[in-house]
Structures are given as structure tokens and as C-alpha cells.
Image (cartoon, rainbow, N blue to C red):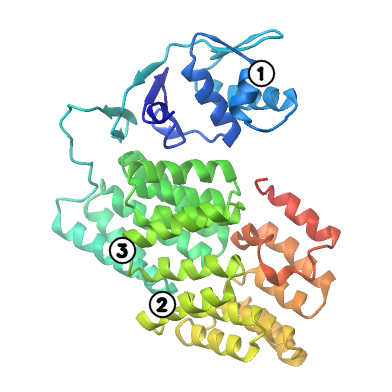
């Protein structure tokens, strides 16, 4: 099996890389469910030969008794995905009552050591033993001024405050003004707008629509660049709620550049929200291995421990981040949320105030204070914070998800559900955490909450 995993297969304009669990068409990743992907690999390995239904069931569902309808449904999913790239061409033939046959020619490439996407045409180049290794395509400008602007943009982006992100946008825009073909700078713009969205500085529609536009531009300029695929993964996760599409984009980014730490960091967030906690922890650890001193990555490790219920470990990790930078807001935010789950309400409120010393009037931390005040039975204080959020909403974007949490903490469930439905209309990215966020525990068994979870179509 190991030899099989090390091979890459070409058929038509598709490339299948089993080891990377990646299917590409014209250089673009194709989203498939896990079982549909396993079916494809099984059929491709026996291209031209009949594979019986029993053999497929044994291979794809080992040690599990499943109905034949599972096979039929996944074959249908696979055909739809493949036929989108082949018009009416049938790649999989049904042999009535017996099984299926993959009917297009397949070219295996033994022990491929690299799979790269090249240029705006999205052509593929494979590299094999004995070939000279080409340096990876770099989207670095030969113009020194453009490159300096790009580097300054990345430095500002890493700070994550609203002001810093706006400075980063100005720097990236200056870079592409000087060098309109600098794909990395367009990718930087995508990352800035995605951050403005997932930090709730601006409305999701404005933020993620812009992120998608700039990431697509970067990908079109340089298809070998991992960054835009990772950015598109965030858009598909947080805004489109396209779970399969997000998975495919993150995997494509990692395949293009296994050392790009942000791709692994964001993929870990996707995996956690998708209910794959073990894989998620592995990816955030791999991200930290690549950038051990990254504040966002180290803070996200604490975020993972928080959602896993390992609160003591989360406290240690987030305090470690604050030893590196006492004013890093995400570490204070997640430390506050951890303290609230430990019942340490005063400590939680103190952490949220630390956030607001750096990020003044940030609705996310204001709402976090409101929920803790309500949980601590400080009803008047929680109601004052609701009024504060209403005043803020008159002059800036306030995420309805946070407002709904304050109502939930106060036990005003009807109001909480009304505002949660507004969060759906906003396409709030916070909704991907609906089934993991412990602050919803008092509402979790309400049929209205179950309906909201159903609308998110979480992976099973």
C-alpha cells in the first residue's frame, strides 16, 4: 500500500495524489467526501478492470457492515464531481448487478517527489527521481520598493489589530500599484480582509467577498503559490460554510507548500470545527514546529485546548503567549474564556478588559464581558453591556452572535434565538463554532438550537 500512496495518477485533465488525499482538475482542487475519495483511488488502481461491489465495500468500509446503498450514493457523488470536468464523458462504467469499472486511461507516475502547479494556465509539472530539482516558483517582485511594501504589509498583518490590518492593506495596495503582477501582495490583501472578517472588525459580506476576490487574483497570477488556496479555504469555511471545499483548498495549500505554517494553522481550525479534534491538534502542532515563536499560532494552540475542555492546559499555553507579548489580544481573549469555564469570573473579566486596553470598543470582547457578567448573576451589569453593544452598533459592525450570547447568559432565550437568526443573515463566521462553544450549553437541547445546527450542515 505504501508504494501505491507514493504514486501520482493522471487521467484526462485530472491528477490524483492518494498520499496527499488530493484530486486536482486543471490545477484546481476538487472537493470529495472521504469515502468517495477512497472509492476513486480503488477504482483508479484497477483501471480497466471490473471491481465487484463486494470488493469495493470491503476496501472502502473495512471491518464495517454497511448497506449497498452507501456504495451507490458515493459512486453518484464521485460521478458528479468527475463529470463536471469531462462534460458528458463517463469515467465510471456500471456493470449491472456486479460492480464498476474505471474506463479512462490512467498514467501512473512512480515515487513522485514533487507535484507543482505552474503559471496562470494551471498546467501541471511532475518531478521524478533523476530529474533536476527546480527551485519553487516565487512570487517575489524584482522591484525593491514593491518588495519592501509587501514585507511591511506582512509585518502589519501579523499584529492583527484593526488599525494594523488597515495599514497592511495600504502597504499591499502600494506593492501591487508598483508591481501589478506581484501575486503574493494580492494574497496579502486576501489575508487582511479575511482577518477583518474573522475578527469581526467589519461585516462578513464585505470582508470575505473582498478576501475571495483578491485570493482568486493571486491564484490566477501564480498557481504555484500556497497562500491564496489557504485564504480561499478560510472563505469557504467561515463565509460560504462549504465544508468540503474548505478541506480541499487547505489540503491543496499544504501540498503546494508543506512548510507554510498559516495553512496548517487554518486547516487545524477547520478540522476542529468539523469535529476532527485529533487531526486538528496535529496540524496546529505542525504549524508551531514551523514557526515556534508565532504569537497567533501559539494562541491558537490554547484555543484548541479550550475547545477540547483541557482548561488547565489552555491556561498554561495562553499565559506562555502573554509572557512573550503581554499585550497580545487573542491570548487575553481566550484566557478570559477559559477562566469563565473554570468559574473564575473576576479573572475572566480582567482578561477581557486587557483586550479592550489594546482593542478599544471591540464588540467581541464587550460581548464576552456581557456573557460573563450574566453568568456571574450580575444582571444589571450584563444589561448595561447590552445597551453598550446597541450604541456601538449605530457606528460600527457588531456581530449578532455576541449579542445573542449575552441574552443567553441572562436566560432570555427567545431574544437569544431571535438574534442568532440575525447572525445567520449576516453570515457570521462565529456560527461554525455553534456545536462546540460551551456558552450555548443552556440552549443546546432546545429544538430551535438543533435547527440552527442543522442549517450549518456540519460534517458528520
Q: Measured along the vertical axis of the image, is residue 378 above or below residue 268?
A: below
Give percent across and percent down for residue 128.
24, 27
Give percent across and percent down for residue 180.
26, 48
How packed is label 1: few (under 14 Cα within 10 Å), some, or many (20 or more)?
few
Which residue is drawn at the image coordinates 31% and 40% (left, top)?
224
Query: What's the CA distance linking mark 3 and mark 1?
Result: 53 Å
Of pointers 1 and 2, the one earlier in the residue sequence:
1
Query: What's the CA distance linking mark 2 and mark 3?
Result: 20 Å
> Can you see residue 423?
yes
Q: In what element is the residue under mark 2?
A: helix
Of pointers 3 and 1, the one earlier in the residue sequence:
1
Q: Quadrant of residue 368?
A: bottom right
Q: Nearer the viewer, residue 129 or 270?
A: 129
Which residue is drawn at the image coordinates 47% and 59% (left, top)?
194
Q: Measured along the vertical axis of the image, is residue 266 above or below residue 138?
A: below
Q: State the residue position of label 3.
A: 154
Q: State the residue position of label 2.
A: 321
Query: What's the CA distance linking mark 1 and mark 2?
Result: 53 Å
Of pointers 2 and 3, the one earlier in the residue sequence:
3
- 11 left or right of 60? left
Amino acid at each position: 500500500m505504501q508504494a501505491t500512496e507514493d504514486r501520482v495518477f493522471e487521467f484526462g485533465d485530472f491528477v490524483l495524489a492518494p498520499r496527499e488525499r488530493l484530486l486536482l482538475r486543471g490545477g484546481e482542487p476538487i472537493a470529495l467526501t472521504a469515502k468517495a475519495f477512497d472509492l476513486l483511488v480503488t477504482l483508479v488502481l484497477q483501471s480497466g478492470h471490473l471491481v465487484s461491489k463486494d470488493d469495493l465495500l470491503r476496501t472502502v468500509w473495512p471491518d464495517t457492515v454497511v448497506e449497498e446503498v452507501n456504495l451507490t450514493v458515493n459512486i453518484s457523488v464521485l460521478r458528479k464531481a468527475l463529470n463536471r470536468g469531462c462534460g458528458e464523458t463517463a469515467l465510471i462504467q456500471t456493470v449491472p448487478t456486479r460492480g464498476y469499472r474505471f474506463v479512462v486511461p490512467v498514467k501512473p507516475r512512480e515515487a513522485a517527489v514533487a507535484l507543482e502547479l505552474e503559471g496562470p494556465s494551471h498546467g501541471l509539472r511532475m518531478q521524478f527521481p533523476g530529474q533536476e530539482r527546480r527551485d519553487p516558483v516565487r512570487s517575489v517582485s524584482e522591484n525593491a520598493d514593491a518588495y519592501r511594501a509587501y514585507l511591511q504589509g506582512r509585518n502589519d498583518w501579523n499584529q492583527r489589530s484593526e488599525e494594523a490590518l488597515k495599514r497592511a492593506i495600504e502597504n499591499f495596495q502600494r506593492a501591487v500599484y508598483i508591481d501589478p503582477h506581484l501575486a503574493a501582495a494580492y494574497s496579502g490583501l486576501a489575508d487582511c480582509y479575511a482577518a477583518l472578517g474573522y475578527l469581526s472588525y467589519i461585516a462578513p459580506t464585505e470582508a470575505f467577498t473582498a478576501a475571495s476576490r483578491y485570493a482568486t487574483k493571486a491564484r490566477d497570477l501564480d498557481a504555484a503559490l500556497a497562500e491564496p488556496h489557504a485564504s480561499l479555504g478560510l472563505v469557504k469555511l467561515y463565509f460560504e460554510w462549504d465544508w468540503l471545499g474548505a478541506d480541499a483548498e487547505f489540503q491543496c495549500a499544504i501540498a503546494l507548500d508543506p512548510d507554510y505554517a498559516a495553512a496548517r494553522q487554518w486547516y487545524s481550525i477547520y478540522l476542529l470545527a468539523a469535529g476532527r479534534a485529533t487531526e486538528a491538534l496535529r496540524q496546529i502542532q505542525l504549524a508551531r514546529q514551523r514557526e515556534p515563536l508565532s504569537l497567533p499560532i501559539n494562541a491558537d494552540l490554547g484555543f484548541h485546548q479550550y475547545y477540547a475542555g483541557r482548561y488547565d492546559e489552555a491556561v498554561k499555553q495562553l499565559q506562555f503567549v502573554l509572557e512573550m507579548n503581554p499585550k497580545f489580544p487573542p491570548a487575553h481573549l481566550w484566557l478570559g474564556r477559559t477562566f469563565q469555564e473554570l468559574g473564575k469570573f473576576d479573572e475572566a473579566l480582567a482578561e477581557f478588559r486587557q483586550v479592550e486596553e489594546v482593542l478599544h470598543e471591540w464588540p467581541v470582547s464587550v460581548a464576552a464581558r456581557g456573557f460573563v457578567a450574566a453568568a456571574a448573576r450580575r444582571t444589571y451589569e450584563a444589561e448595561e453591556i447590552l445597551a453598550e453593544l446597541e450604541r456601538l452598533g449605530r457606528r460600527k459592525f457588531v456581530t449578532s452572535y455576541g449579542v445573542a450570547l449575552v441574552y443567553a447568559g441572562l436566560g432570555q432565550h427567545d431574544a437569544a434565538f431571535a438574534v442568532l437568526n440575525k447572525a445567520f443573515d449576516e453570515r457570521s463566521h462565529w456560527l461554525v463554532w455553534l456545536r462546540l462553544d460551551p456558552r450555548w450549553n443552556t440552549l443546546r437541547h432546545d429544538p430551535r438550537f438543533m435547527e440552527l445546527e442543522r442549517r450549518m450542515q456540519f460534517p458528520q
